Amino acid sequence: MPETALPQWDMTPFFPGLESPEFNAAFQKVVDDIDSLAAFVDDHAIDRRDVPALTPPDAVVLEQLIDRFNSVFEQQRLLASYIHGFVATNTRDAIAQARNSEALQQWVRITPLYTRLTLWVGSLDVDALIAQSTFAAEYAYLLRRMKVEAQHKMSSAEEILASELEPIGASAWAKMRDNLTSQIMVPIELDGVKQELPMTAVNNLAHSPDREVRRIAYEAELAAWEKGTLPIAASINSVKGQAVVLARKRHWAGVLDEKIFDSRIDRPTLDAMMAAAHESFPDFRRYLKAKARTLGIDTLAWYDIGAPLGSTEKVWEWGEAERFITDTFGGYSRKLGDFAARAFAERWIDAEPRSGKVGGGFCMGVRGDQSRILVNFEPSFNSVSTVAHELGHAYHNLVLADTPPLKSEFPMTLAETASIFCETIIRHAGLTGASKPEQIAILDASLQGSCAVVVDITSRFLFEQRFLDARAKRELSVPEINALMLDAQAETYGEAIDPVLRHPYMWAYKPHYYHSTFYNYPYMFGLLFGLGLYARYQQDPESFRDRYDALLESTGVADAADLAARFGIDIRTTDFWRASLDIVRADIDRFEKLVA
């Protein structure tokens, strides 16, 4: 592959194509297995029952149910990820969109069956079941969570209706938003040439060393959003409106309370972390002001946040990024280095920005220890760091490869642990032996990321809180949504960003709002928890590696507080989060000295 070529991922190890006999056979197999699972659930009257006392067959039925669900979920992950691999890289692919729609009609059938299992388990004497059955004891964590979750379920009929409406409700609105935004072509004039670029390519211009290019791209982006946000506003109103209704019907105090339970943390943990984040805003503003001085301007505009510093920044072509990541990961452990080399060699990564491809980046597990990673690469250390971040997710999938699906489903809070850890390894390696200009560039890229995950994530958290509160009363217009976004940015960035040059359409740009509620704070948790773990690694590298893999392997069967306690961490105290942020503060101090 030429040095300048960017890879596209290879999906052929799974199936020859979406219309191949092999894919069709696998699809029919999972449909048949869902049918069989549904018949089993009906035959055994799996649902909430009035008497919690156990009957002799209960333990046997539970084992059969869990085995069947594990099998269906494993097949479903393979097919869903395979289809998404085509949709995400080309939303104009009519065949992929059709197969995706067809698949969603099948996946939605699983949800009410799992709900009935949850209601059934929730009505049993779970402690007695765990005491009597070795198999149940292996799933003790899952069963006890089901016991709590069952208290927040509607009736079976209502839950079935909700799941059947999902594909034509929130999921349909999210799909519409993704398809619409991925196909937006932005009119822009660069160097006297008028052209149209995909939104992802325009976003990448935010990292141009030329401030005029960044300004033009920013203004072109805002103009494109202004023309296209009416349907996107309808989408976010519908998605969040549905979330508000379902949380109320399920007897949660609010959408946030439901999300906290799903995140496997508690309110004291969230409050302690957010308090530490707010304390850190003056330090992040120090960084942003130092960056403004380095760029020779009084105050940063939104389009300056991602600006590279100076013309001496190292250009990271794909081949060099690949070698650097593989070698650096290998310095941590041979297992991690070999894993990265395999991911590159087997073309797990789709890195090329192009029209029809969704923006941002993600990693999805596909089958066994194999994942696929989507990024929109540009030749900067920031993009190198993004690739390392997503490879961290893939490594997490590798560690969990032999764990059954029902014991490997981890929350977003813990999903970021491995990715942040790998990102931190890369940053430290990049700083070692680097010249002063390179140190500035690497620190700037890292601090951009930390600022995004602490400051900007807080703005998104505040925005979503306030949007949900308002949406409980009525729909919001585009100007009202923009105002909420700008208020949240003012509260977090403060005077460090020019108030007339912020980004009112971040709610339209970020796809996460449409696929999840409160997707935001788990990223902050992941960053700060990952930094805290890295500090433990530095203290004792030899004993850390095996304990770290064991932690990743347990992310589906333990609460975050219990996992943290294995490393002597108390996540319910502000002190831990403050200590993690001290690592970022030290980088800000170093950055200020380098650019002074």
Image (cartoon, grey):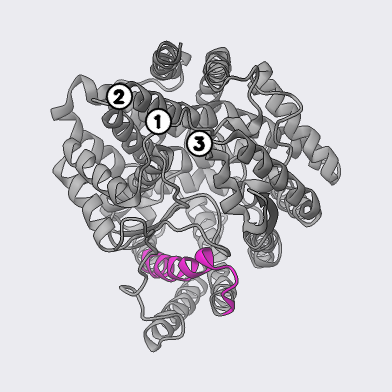
Residue 513: x, y in percent?
64, 46
Residue type pointed to by label 1 = Thr
Q: Residue at x 84, y 46 (%)?
A: 475
Region in magenta: 70-94
Q: Residue at x 27, y 56 (%)?
A: 343
Whether residues under marks 3 and 2 lie with C-beta atoms below 8 angstroms apart, the answer is no
Quadrant where the N terminus sits is bottom left
Whether residues under marks 2 and 1 lie with C-beta atoms below 8 angstroms apart, the answer is yes
To which quarter of the image does residue 94 belong? bottom right
To which quarter of the image does residue 444 belong? top left
Q: Is residue 216 above or below residue 47?
A: above
Disc 1 marks which residue?
A: 312
Q: Which tag is nearer the camera, tag 3 or tag 2? A: 2
Disc 2 marks which residue?
A: 435
What is the number of the mark on residue 522?
3
Residue 452: x, y in percent?
54, 31
Q: Which tag is nearer the camera, tag 1 or tag 3? A: 1
Q: Is residue 228 above or below residue 538?
A: below
- 464 within the magenta span: no
- In 3D space, how far apart are the residues under numbered discs 2 and 1 (Cα atoms)? 10 Å
Task: Name the outermost residue toward the front.
Answer: 192
